[in-house]
Image (cartoon, rainbow, N blue to C red):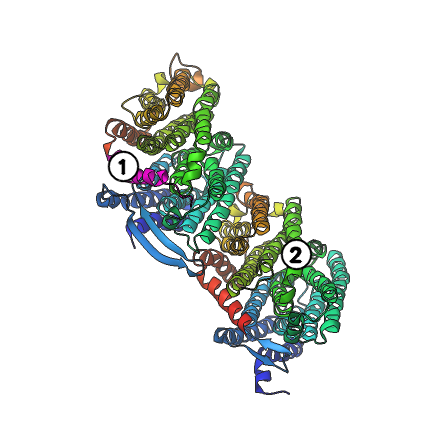
């Protein structure tokens, strides 16, 4: 049954798909070396999509389309809106970099970026195992191609290969787990699965067996330990603009499918998956933070830092249900803490990679930590922006990253359970370790003498967006209330429907 | 906007403005702008003194607006007799530091001055915050400018010092963060410090909270045995950084004991008072002896700071009004005296680029005016009656004797150690024949340096001769605090 509501639920997706195809064709006629025409058209499209999603999101309504295959709710719409903005920012930062490296001979960067965004939209909006899986595949296939976009570059090709092999395995895990759940419950629809599991009629072993595979697949996509091996290699090997495309917006989609599968679908199994998430979280915090210390490459360090940040997201996700008892306030606090964490993480990552992209020149990748030496003397503004990012990731107030950690710690401590409190203490001790390696980069930027005095020049659009992005880290840190209640409201509306 | 908000945000606004000034092209203008900012920051704290009502323990100049509604966090400011004096003190020391760094800082002047002004506003925020999370945000945010000040303008081993400073203090405050969130949950969702004061807590919880707070504040004060970061950091920090660190930042920790540990966990505080007294006495005696054998002037003053802060914590944990008031007076006095000591060393360092005591000798012959100031500050440092250093120490010793004669005796012995290391250093640096040709070539202080030292000398003498304005302000609040601590919160 296809009705008006069904179409309404996926208008932004349709627009995105049509425009991605149109832009692919239009691009054939664009001849400027930086693909200005394609770029402007892409940005306009994304801007319209972002506004459209913002309008959907602020209405706060939930409706299902195509026989419950897709859902349009406040959480999903906000995540789509943020993902679109993140993709726009990524393209702005990445265009000069890509142009210098021959990645703009065709318009693939833009069209593949749009297709990967479409994949994220389908993941976020999917209310059915297969729809979510399709979205995930669209995203990852586009990402494989993006990583390999510099086909004459050996490290990039190696990273693409690694990403593809491990990614395919993870998709296999996820699909296998989903098929087990389908076999046990007899439905692919998340709402139906929830009802079936909640009835208590289904054999627990079968469900948990499927659950293990689903969690493993999700952990791979989030980059949690022990499924993290691809993260440093791909972050390091991929062209920096693509690293940002993989490390930025897709984390929002990964968060969304965790919510859809584990919370919307399998909340009655919370006791089981919480234990798994706890192990993943502790492992991620430990390995991510300790391994980051040893890195000399900034992209690799940020990759390990991402792993540890995902540990915090998982801590928030596991603290929603206490002893299998579902309490609306606790659930809302925990999941909105995670959502806030992911959103601020993406914002911070964008600015950090924005600065890295800006420092590269033709034929020079500025990705070693030592390349940042004396940045403060070369450009106080960009050094300041990167310092804001690093302090934010370290969770030092008044940067926004502090409030993200605060929300997650509060979600953990609110349970009053001793194991959760112990985990909170563990998490803060690990963030002390984290502070060390973030500070080391600040040290290189501020305390060391510059190795080169080349001036840093950037196009006006990059400069403006980057300054705005950096300022947001501080402004949201001084006034975090708005974004926090947005997340809380979105989670509440989505879960109550 | 209330007076306290002005006191916090005026220097921060000027600091941010300075950061926007770019490179060192306009260093002269930057210095003057920084001075205007520091003076404006000091000027807005003066009406506080006029408006402060004596004889009440209530919070004054209160401002309260919702800040983060999801967490029930308020932008809640106010001062009582305990915190009041630190607001003008911080602004005053900032003015001093800006003037004292006028010529000694020549690279990235705008960032240096900006960092100090921002730091000043943040520290005033710590003293004025009445919301637990607001306190924590200010408390932690002070680390960033100080880290940069030490790391950019510090001495040869500055990077080690900057990291040690940041990570040491962060470790303590992260445990405090857990304690704050725990209290938030215990009090049914409130970050209001006054609510926490009234919150009944069982003994085990109080003990855990007490030690979580201790981790944060003991490192900051610093108490023995977690004081080891302070000498390293002082030696490497630029003069202004040392002055602000010793004069104000150490007080953030001591203030935390009065605002958090004692009133929130009174039973645990009384139970563990023996430990706090023991640690304080070790700081006073043992660290005092350690100070004596230092070869580096800054290290000596740093150890002497640890010893003096030992008096502060000792005064707090003997639980009588003389002790607590004495501790607070000692905090203020040490603010003036330690700033003066570090600035005096800065005066010598600017000329000789050495802090080794052995490189000096007979400075009085070439710098008589300066030596006169140095003598006054040295005397204040060892607690000579008539100087600020005497009042607090004397009050604390009397309080300790009231509590237990032997504790009092041990504390009083510190006057001997203090005199020993201070005077011995003075003798080796200033007195005797001219030590070497470098000392012979020294020029006496400029009028700018004279002005800075004279202001501090005035403060030191004024407080030593007429401490009434200081003690009057704190009496009611201290009495109220002790009344609160005496009541058990166990239920």
Depth order, front residue of A31/B3: B3
Q: Which residue corresponds to the image point at 75% horizontal and 73% vertical from the top-left?
A: A183
Q: Is residue A173 left or right of residue B269?
A: right
Q: Which residue is mark 1?
A: B475
Category of crowding for the residue at label 2, using alpha-carbon neighbours closer than 10 angstroms: few (below 14), some (14–19), many (at least 20): few
What segment carries the magenta color? B469-491
Category of crowding for the residue at label 1, using alpha-carbon neighbours closer than 10 angstroms: few (below 14), some (14–19), many (at least 20): many
- From the viewer's perspective, is the residue at label 1 or at label 2 nearer? 2
Residue B489 included in the magenta stretch of the image: yes
Q: Residue furthest top?
A: B433
Mark 1 lies on a secondary structure that is helix
Depth order, front residue of B309/A213: A213
Where is residue A182 drawn, in percent x and y?
Answer: 73, 73
User: The numbered mark 2 sits on a residue in which chain?
Assistant: A
Question: In this picture, is B343 found above or below A119?
Answer: above
Q: CA distance from mark 1 to mark 2?
A: 54 Å
Depth order, front residue of A336/B465: A336
Residue A347, image quadrant: bottom right
Name the mark on residue B194: none
Name the mark on residue A275: 2
Q: Which residue corresponds to the image point at 48% horizontal and 62% vertical from the top-left?
A: A484
User: The numbered mark 1 sits on a residue in which chain?
Assistant: B
């Amino acid at each position: 049954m296809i009705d008006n509501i069904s179409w309404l639920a996926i208008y932004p997706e349709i627009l995105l798909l049509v425009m991605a195809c149109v832009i692919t064709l239009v691009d054939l006629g664009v001849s400027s070396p930086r693909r200005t025409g394609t770029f402007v058209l892409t940005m306009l499209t994304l801007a319209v999509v972002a506004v459209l999603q913002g309008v959907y999101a602020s209405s706060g309504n939930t409706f299902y389309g195509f026989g419950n295959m897709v859902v349009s709710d406040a959480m999903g719409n906000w995540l789509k809106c943020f993902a679109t903005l993140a993709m726009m920012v990524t393209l702005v930062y990445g265009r000069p970099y890509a142009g210098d490296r021959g990645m703009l001979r065709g318009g693939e960067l833009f069209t593949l970026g749009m297709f990967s965004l479409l994949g994220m939209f389908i993941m976020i909006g999917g209310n059915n195992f297969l729809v979510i899986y399709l979205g995930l595949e669209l995203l990852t296939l586009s990402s494989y191609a993006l990583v390999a976009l510099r086909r004459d570059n050996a490290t990039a090709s190696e990273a693409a290969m690694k990403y593809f092999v491990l990614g395919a395995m993870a998709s296999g895990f996820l699909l296998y787990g989903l098929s087990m759940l389908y076999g046990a419950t007899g439905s692919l629809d998340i709402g139906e699965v929830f009802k079936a599991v909640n009835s208590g009629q289904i054999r627990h072993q079968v469900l948990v067996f499927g659950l293990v595979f689903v969690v493993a697949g999700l952990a791979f996509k989030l980059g949690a330990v022990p499924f993290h091996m691809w993260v440093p290699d791909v972050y390091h090997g991929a062209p920096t603009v693509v690293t940002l495309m993989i490390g930025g917006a897709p984390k929002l989609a990964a968060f969304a499918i965790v919510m859809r599968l584990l919370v919307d679908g399998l909340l009655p199994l919370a006791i089981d998956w919480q234990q798994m998430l706890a192990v993943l979280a502790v492992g991620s915090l430990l390995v991510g933070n300790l391994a980051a210390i040893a890195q000399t490459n900034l992209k690799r360090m940020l990759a390990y830092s991402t792993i540890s940040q995902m540990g915090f997201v998982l801590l928030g996700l596991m603290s929603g249900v206490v002893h299998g008892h579902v309490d609306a306030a606790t659930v809302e606090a925990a999941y909105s803490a995670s959502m806030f964490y992911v959103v601020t993480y993406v914002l911070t990552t964008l600015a950090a990679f924005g600065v890295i992209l800006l420092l590269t020149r033709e034929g020079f990748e500025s990705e070693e930590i030592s390349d940042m030496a004396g940045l403060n003397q070369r450009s106080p503004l960009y050094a300041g922006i990167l310092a804001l990012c690093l302090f934010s990731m370290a969770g030092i107030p008044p940067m926004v990253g502090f409030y993200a950690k605060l929300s997650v710690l509060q979600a953990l401590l609110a349970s009053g359970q001793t194991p959760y409190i112990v985990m909170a203490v563990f998490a803060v001790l690990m963030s002390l370790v984290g502070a060390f390696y973030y500070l080391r980069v600040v040290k290189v930027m501020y305390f060391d003498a510059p190795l080169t005095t080349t001036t840093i020049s950037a196009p006006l659009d990059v400069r403006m967006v980057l300054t705005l992005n950096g300022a947001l880290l501080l402004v949201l840190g001084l006034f975090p209330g708005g974004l926090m209640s947005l997340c809380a409201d979105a989670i509440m509306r989505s879960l109550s429907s | 906007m209330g007076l306290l908000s002005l006191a916090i945000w005026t220097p921060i606004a000027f600091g941010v403005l300075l950061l926007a000034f770019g490179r060192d092209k306009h260093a002269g203008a930057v210095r003057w702008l920084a001075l205007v900012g520091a003076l404006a920051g000091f000027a807005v704290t003066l009406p506080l003194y006029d408006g402060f009502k004596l004889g009440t323990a209530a919070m004054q100049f209160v401002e309260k607006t919702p800040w983060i509604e999801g967490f029930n966090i308020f932008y809640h400011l106010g001062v009582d007799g305990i915190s009041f004096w630190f607001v003008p003190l911080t602004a005053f020391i900032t003015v001093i530091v800006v003037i004292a760094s006028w010529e000694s800082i020549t690279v990235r002047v705008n960032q240096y001055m900006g960092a100090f002004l921002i730091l000043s506003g943040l520290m005033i925020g710590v003293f004025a915050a009445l919301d637990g999370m607001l306190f924590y945000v200010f408390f932690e945010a002070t680390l960033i400018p100080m880290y940069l000040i030490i790391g950019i303008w510090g001495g040869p081993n500055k990077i080690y010092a900057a990291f040690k400073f940041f990570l040491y203090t962060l470790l303590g405050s992260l445990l405090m963060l857990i304690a704050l969130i725990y209290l938030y949950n215990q009090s049914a969702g409130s970050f209001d410090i006054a609510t926490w004061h009234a919150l009944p807590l069982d003994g085990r919880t109080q003990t855990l909270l007490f030690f979580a707070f201790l981790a944060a504040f003991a490192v900051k004060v610093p108490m023995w045995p977690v004081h080891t970061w302070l000498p390293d950091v002082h030696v490497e920090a630029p003069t202004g950084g040392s002055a602000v660190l010793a004069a104000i930042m150490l007080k953030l920790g001591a203030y935390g004991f009065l605002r958090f540990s004692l009133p929130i966990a009174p039973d645990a505080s009384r139970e563990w008072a023996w430990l706090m007294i023991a640690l304080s006495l070790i700081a006073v005696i043992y660290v005092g002896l350690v100070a004596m054998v230092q070869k580096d002037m800054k290290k000596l003053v740093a150890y002497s700071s640890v010893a003096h802060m030992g008096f502060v914590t000792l005064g707090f944990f003997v639980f009588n009004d003389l002790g607590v008031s004495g501790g607070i007076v000692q905090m203020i006095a040490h603010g003036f005296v330690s700033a003066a000591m570090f600035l005096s060393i800065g005066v010598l360092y600017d000329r000789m680029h050495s802090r080794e005591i052995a490189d000096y000798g007979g400075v009085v012959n070439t710098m008589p005016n300066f030596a006169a100031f140095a003598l006054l500050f040295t005397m204040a440092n060892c607690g000579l009656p008539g100087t600020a250093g005497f009042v607090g120490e004397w009050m604390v010793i009397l309080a300790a004797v009231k509590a237990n004669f032997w504790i009092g005796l041990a504390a009083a012995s510190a006057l001997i150690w203090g005199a020993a290391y201070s005077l011995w250093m003075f003798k080796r640096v200033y007195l005797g024949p001219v030590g070497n040709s470098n000392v012979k070539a020294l020029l006496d202080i400029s009028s700018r340096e004279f002005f800075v030292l004279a202001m501090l000398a005035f403060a030191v003498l004024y407080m030593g001769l007429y401490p009434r304005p200081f003690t009057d302000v704190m009496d009611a609040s201290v009495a109220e605090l002790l009344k609160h601590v005496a009541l058990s919160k166990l239920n």
